[in-house]
Every structure is written in C-alpha cells, then in structure tokens.
C-alpha cells in the first residue's frame, strides 16, 4: 500500500541566495505554505524555519552566526523551493524562485530563533518597480497577452487567455502591468456568456479566464464528507475525504444581494458628447445566467423592482487624435452583467481541508458530496442542496514534518447538484 496523501512530504530544495552565496534551509524548515487565489495575480508562499546559529560566518566579526544575521536577510533574497508530495505533482519553484518580501522573527532565545519568510513572485517585484505609461488599443485579451509577454517576459506555454469579444483603448498612467490587467477583468466580455474575468497565477502559469469558461470546465476531483469516516488518513480510500467538517462561511445573504443590485439594477449612462443620458434596467429573470454551478438562481423572480442604481460616464473619443463618436468599450455591454456575475458567484462560500492534493489549482472545479441528514440515506445519501460542483477561489498547500494537506475556499452561485445550461 502506498503512503497516505496526508503524510509528510519531501523537501527536495529549500535554499536562500544572496550576492552569489547559497544557504540550505532544508534541515531547519518547520513548515511551508504555498498559496494561490483567483484574486491574486501572483502566487505566494511562507516558510517557517528554526535557526540554532553557527550556520554562516559573519564577514565583519569572523564569528559563525544565524542565517538572518550573517547573510543578512533584509528582503529581495531569492528562495528556491522544490517539494515532492506523497501523491501528486512536484511543487517546483527552483527555476523561478520566490523573493523575500518580509522576514519577521517569531521567537528568539539564547541559542536559537524562529523566522518566518514571507515570499512573493519575482513578477510582483517587477510589477511594483516598472510603471507603464504606454497606450493600448484593440481587443482586451490581446492587450493582456502583450503586457505579459513584453513587460514580464512570460512565455506562451505559461499563459492561458480566454478571448474577449470587446476592445478597450487606455493609457497605463504609471500603473504596474499586473494592476492594469486586474482592472480589465470587470470590463471584459467573453465571446459567449456573461461579462467578468479573473486574472491569477497558479503553479502552471498566468491565466486570464472568463467566469463563463471556468464554470464550463469539467470537475477535477470529488471530495466526500460523511460523518462516519475515519480521520486518521492511514488508508488510501480516505484520500478524497475531508479531514475535518466543512465550514460554511456564507450561505446566501439576501439583503447584501439586494443592496448589490444582483437581480435587478438601474443603470444610467451619460454621454458627454451630447449631454444626454440613457437609463437601462437590468433584470436577471429576463437576461438569464448563461452558466451556473447548480440549479437556477434562487428568488430570481421574487425581486420586483431595481435595488441599486449605477452611474457611468461614457468614454467617447477621449484617446482619439481625430474626435470620434464611438464609445470606448461601451459599459452598457458589461457593467450590470459583471456586477451580477461576481456577486452571484459568491452566494455560497465554504472552507474545506483534504489530504495533500498538488494536482488541483485555483480556478478548478471540484465536486463536494455532503452526507444527508435524512433517515432514509439508502435512497439518497447526499444533501441535494449543499452538495454539487464548486469553484476553487483560494488554495493553500501545507507541508510540515508530520503531515501534508490542502485547504481550499470554494464558492458557487446557486444551490443543487446539477448545473444549468442555456
């Protein structure tokens, strides 16, 4: 029988480099946490290690001191990580190392100290120190690819972009490239489906994906939660079971949904060229939702009037050398739709923890099967409301000397075990 997925993983490489000097932290590492999120354009990590001193010679005093004091660790040092989990893909950042963002000392005694290294991607540093003033025109998806390739030198095999049908002309105005792309997400409309994109990084690369496309993906894994399962994780058949009960952080919030104008909204668009305005009412029961993870949105026909008003000034010819009457990326095509899509997607939020699964990434679809409390479980053992497909919003792989597990924040837009298609 192979080792359980929740068992300890192997630290292949954990090294810190500065000014040509490389120090191995593998022996003193207590834990490693690796993070991905649909909200984050870069991956991050945290290493906690214990240093008993005597690891590096201080060039000034010729004494052997701790790594933090002797290197010294002050920030922007390169950190290489390569971890082999008991199951799944190797987590390898040895060729594309992290950078030290912060290095607080957690505890300090006479003969040892515990240090936490907060790590960020090199691309995050590049983003912060490289302001962009360029002008961009054309389809948004083409602009995203151009920024990633030209400003961040990302290769094609590390980029996955869903095409957009709309274009947008804009100036960088001194912002970082990753920030520019994040701002484009809500303004983007896919070739098919509702407006709204996510821009994020996983271990496989950078992704600019429409919500429509993400929800259309096939599920990667099914995780089960049944009250009677064993929690010792010593058997193979427990690898896809939750190691603790799911925590439902949010299960619909009607007043918040109504205040956000998710189901009904009034949208007023002002044209500075003609000094006229247009009022458009958005109704989800008329427009519909092209793709959901569960059944139809709840109470979509129960809300009779608009619950929020949005205002927008149309961009007409502001970047054209010859004045134009064309509206730049007309918000009538995406404003109400993207607000609905982002808010609806967060209707249900649940936190789960499973034995380490390095195959999955943020943005993947997973199925969560939760035990029903019915007294007739032989007929249907599943909770038909809370079970079903979910989207991974946040993800953390945790590794220490005793265990390895994956924690996830899952979201979805509607209830039920079946998704709708239109």
Image (cartoon, rainbow, N blue to C red):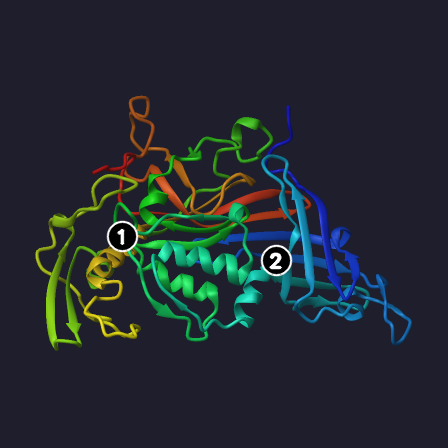
Q: Residue at x 16, y 76 (%)?
A: 273
Return the disc, 2 or 1, that comes first in the chain's sequence: 2
Q: Is residue 300 visible?
A: no
Q: Residues within 10 Å of mark 1 (few under 14, many from 20)?
A: many
Establish if 49 lies above or below 226.
Answer: below
| Contact between labelled residues 1 and 2, with CB atoms less than 8 Å apart | no
Q: Residue at x 68, y 58 (%)?
A: 79
| Residue corresponding to mark 1 | 344
Q: Say the numbered circle drawn on residue 67.
A: none
Q: Residues within 10 Å of mark 2 (few under 14, many from 20)?
A: many
Q: Position of residue 18 (x, y in %)?
A: 75, 65
| Residue corresponding to mark 2 | 46
Please name whichever residue, 243 or 389, is drawn nearer the observer in this view of the structure. Answer: 389
- Most extreme residue toward the top, as rendered? 378
For this view, does 382 lie left or right of residue 161? left
Establish if 128 lies above or below 55.
Answer: below
Q: Position of residue 60 (x, y in %)?
A: 87, 76
What count of labels does the image hold?
2
Q: Position of residue 92 (x, y in %)?
A: 64, 46
Label 1 element class:
helix
For this view, does 415 lie left or right of residue 155? left
- Most extreme residue toward the left, as rendered? 304
* Quadrant location of the C terminus in the rendered image: top left
State the CA–CA distance, disc 2 to disc 1. 32 Å
For this view, does 281 lie left or right of residue 398? left
* Quadrant location of the N terminus in the rendered image: top right
């Amino acid at each position: 029988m192979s080792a359980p997925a929740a068992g300890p993983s192997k630290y292949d490489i954990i090294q810190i480099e500065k000014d040509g000097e490389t120090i191995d932290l593998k022996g003193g590492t207590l834990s490693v946490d690796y993070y991905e999120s649909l909200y984050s354009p870069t991956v991050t990590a945290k290493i906690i290690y214990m240093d008993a001193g005597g690891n590096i010679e201080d060039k000034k005093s010729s004494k052997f001191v701790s790594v933090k004091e002797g290197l010294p660790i002050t920030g922007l040092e390169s950190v290489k990580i390569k971890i082999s989990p008991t199951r799944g893909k190797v987590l390898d950042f040895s060729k594309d190392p992290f950078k030290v963002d912060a290095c607080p000392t957690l505890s300090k005694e006479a003969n040892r100290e515990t240090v936490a290294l907060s790590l960020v991607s090199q691309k995050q540093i590049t983003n912060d120190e490289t302001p962009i003033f360029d002008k961009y025109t054309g389809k948004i998806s083409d602009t995203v690819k151009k920024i990633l390739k030209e400003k961040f030198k990302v290769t094609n095999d590390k980029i996955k972009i869903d095409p957009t049908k709309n274009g947008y002309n804009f100036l960088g105005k001194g912002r970082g490239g990753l920030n520019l792309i994040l701002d484009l997400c809500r303004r983007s409309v896919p070739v098919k489906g509702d407006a709204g994109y996510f821009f994020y990084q996983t271990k496989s690369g950078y992704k600019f994906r429409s919500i429509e496309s993400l929800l259309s993906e096939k599920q990667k894994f099914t995780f089960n939660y049944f009250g009677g399962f064993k929690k010792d994780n010593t058997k193979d058949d427990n690898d896809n079971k939750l190691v603790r009960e799911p925590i439902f952080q949010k299960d619909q919030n009607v007043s918040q949904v109504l205040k956000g104008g998710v189901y009904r909204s009034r949208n007023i668009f002002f044209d500075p060229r003609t000094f006229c305005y247009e009022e458009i009412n958005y109704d989800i029961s008329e427009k519909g939702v092209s793709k959901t993870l569960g059944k139809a949105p709840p109470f979509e026909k129960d809300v009779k009037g608009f619950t929020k008003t949005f205002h927008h000034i149309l961009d007409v010819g502001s970047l054209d050398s010859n004045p134009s009457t064309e509206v730049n990326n007309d918000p009538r095509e995406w404003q109400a739709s993207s607000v609905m899509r982002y808010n609806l997607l967060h209707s249900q939020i649940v936190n789960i923890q499973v034995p380490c699964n390095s195959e999955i990434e943020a943005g993947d679809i997973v199925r969560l099967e939760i035990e029903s409390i019915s007294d007739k479980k032989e007929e249907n053992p599943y909770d038909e409301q809370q079970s079903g497909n979910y989207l991974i919003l946040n993800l953390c792989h945790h590794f220490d000397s005793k265990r390895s597990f994956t924690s996830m924040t899952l979201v979805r837009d509607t209830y039920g075990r079946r998704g709708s298609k239109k």
